[in-house]
Image (tube, grey):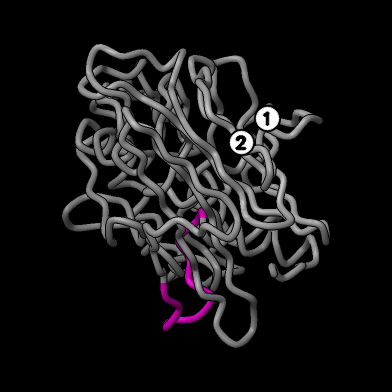
């Protein structure tokens, strides 16, 4: 049985996971690769199936949040337009794909056939008889093949604005943040244009192989931009140069890095709701990594203007 969270708590926690900000200093990230057969299982006789359930513990103040994803690695020479899979669900569940009103699989009618992933990642939603839901992002790729180019930018607009108010935040802290911002802008400007407001006005094109993640895309982009990432494989604590990095809590108490994505150049940026290391690339995505001073407050609205 899943816990039903209020919308605010769910959004807040999802946001926390995206940003890599811990609710408390001791918050943990737990990754499981064992499928939960009581809800949904995806298998294939020809395709390698990887499963990831990443949980960020909320501590004593907030509930935990878990995000679920699958990656289907088709053998070399195969096609993502016809991926053979079997989908079984636990008692009381139905599984729907991409908003369909007819279930793909039920307990007495599992799915055995092929699915077309040529349009990118699919969203599977398991719903039980109590109305509880669990969402799975499912992506496929062909082993050894190149993905469509992915595009990445790194913006420090909010830090620039924060440091521009020394009377409010303190001269010493403002100067420290300004130094870090200046270092990032100087490094980025050698490769891509970045304006005085701290917004990159072009993207870094990144070419990766099938199976890569949003974190891989960030790492590749930072290599091009002469930037370094501080943190772990699942957590971006800071981004900057070898000597000066802008990171968590540098401005306000809940400041840090988050990312948004869109699936095409003409699309709208939105919060991915998945940790970058769990976001399997379909290819062709656009990513904006944004330093924010706090949760909400419209600090990423400028991306879609």
User: Within the image, what quadrant is residue 205 found in?
Assistant: top left
Q: Which residue is mark 2?
A: 123
Please report the residue visible at 18 percent of the width from the left and 58 percent of the height from the top: 243
Single out the residue that lies furthest toward the bottom.
Answer: 60
Q: Is residue 183 left or right of residue 302?
A: left
The one of 67 and 160 positioned closer to us in this rendering: 67
Q: Disc 2, disc 1: CB below 8 Å?
A: yes
The one of 300 and 213 positioned closer to us in this rendering: 213
Rendering coords of residue 15 (x, y %): 60, 57
N-term-proximal mark, 2 vs 1: 1
Single out the residue that lies furthest toward the left.
Answer: 242
Please report the residue visible at 41 percent of the width from the left and 52 percent of the height from the top: 52
> In the image, which residues are magenta?
18-28
Single out the residue that lies furthest toward the front.
Answer: 108
Name above or below for residue 117 compared with residue 198.
above
The one of 218 and 179 positioned closer to us in this rendering: 218
Rendering coords of residue 30 (x, y %): 40, 69
Q: Is residue 257 left or right of residue 4?
A: left
Mark 2 Cα within 10 Å, few/some/many (few <14, many 20+)? some
Please report the residue visible at 32 percent of the width from the left and 35 percent of the height from the top: 217
The residues tagged by marks 2 and 1 sit, at their Cα atoms, a distance apart of 5 Å
- Which disc is residue 161 wearing? none
Mark 1 Cα within 10 Å, few/some/many (few <14, many 20+)? few
Q: Is residue 283 left or right of residue 90?
A: left
Please report the residue visible at 70 percent of the width from the left and 36 percent of the height from the top: 96
The one of 135 and 93 positioned closer to us in this rendering: 93
Query: Which is the main secondary structure of the residues drawn in magenta?
Result: loop
Rendering coords of residue 104 (x, y %): 67, 32
- Which disc is residue 98 wearing? 1
SS at mark 2? strand
């Amino acid at each position: 049985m899943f816990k039903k969270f209020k919308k605010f708590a769910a959004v807040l926690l999802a946001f926390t996971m995206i940003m890599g900000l811990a609710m408390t200093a001791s918050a943990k990230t737990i990754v499981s690769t064992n499928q939960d057969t009581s809800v949904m299982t995806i298998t294939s006789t020809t395709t390698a199936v990887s499963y990831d359930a990443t949980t960020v513990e909320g501590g004593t103040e907030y509930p935990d949040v878990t995000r679920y994803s699958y990656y289907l690695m088709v053998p070399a020479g195969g096609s993502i337009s016809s991926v053979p899979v079997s989908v079984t669900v636990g008692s009381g569940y139905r599984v729907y794909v991409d908003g369909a009103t007819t279930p793909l699989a039920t307990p007495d009618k599992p799915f055995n056939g092929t699915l077309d992933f040529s349009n990118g990642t699919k969203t599977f939603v398991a719903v039980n008889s109590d109305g509880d839901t669990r969402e799975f992002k499912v992506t496929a790729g062909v082993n050894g093949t190149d993905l469509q180019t992915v595009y990445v930018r790194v913006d420090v607009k909010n830090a620039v604005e924060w440091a521009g108010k020394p009377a409010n935040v303190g001269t010493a802290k403002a100067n420290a943040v300004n130094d870090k911002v200046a270092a990032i802008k100087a490094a980025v400007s050698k490769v891509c244009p970045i304006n005085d407001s701290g917004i990159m006005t072009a993207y870094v094109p990144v070419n990766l192989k099938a199976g890569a993640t949003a974190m891989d895309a960030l790492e590749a982009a930072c290599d091009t931009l002469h930037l370094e990432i501080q943190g772990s494989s699942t957590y971006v604590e800071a981004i900057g140069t070898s000597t000066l990095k802008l990171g968590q809590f540098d401005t306000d108490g809940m400041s840090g890095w988050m990312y948004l994505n869109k699936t095409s150049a003409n699309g709208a940026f939105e919060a991915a709701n998945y940790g970058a290391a769990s976001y399997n690339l379909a290819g062709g995505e656009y990513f904006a990594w944004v330093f924010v001073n706090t949760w909400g407050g419209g600090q990423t609205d400028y991306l879609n203007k």
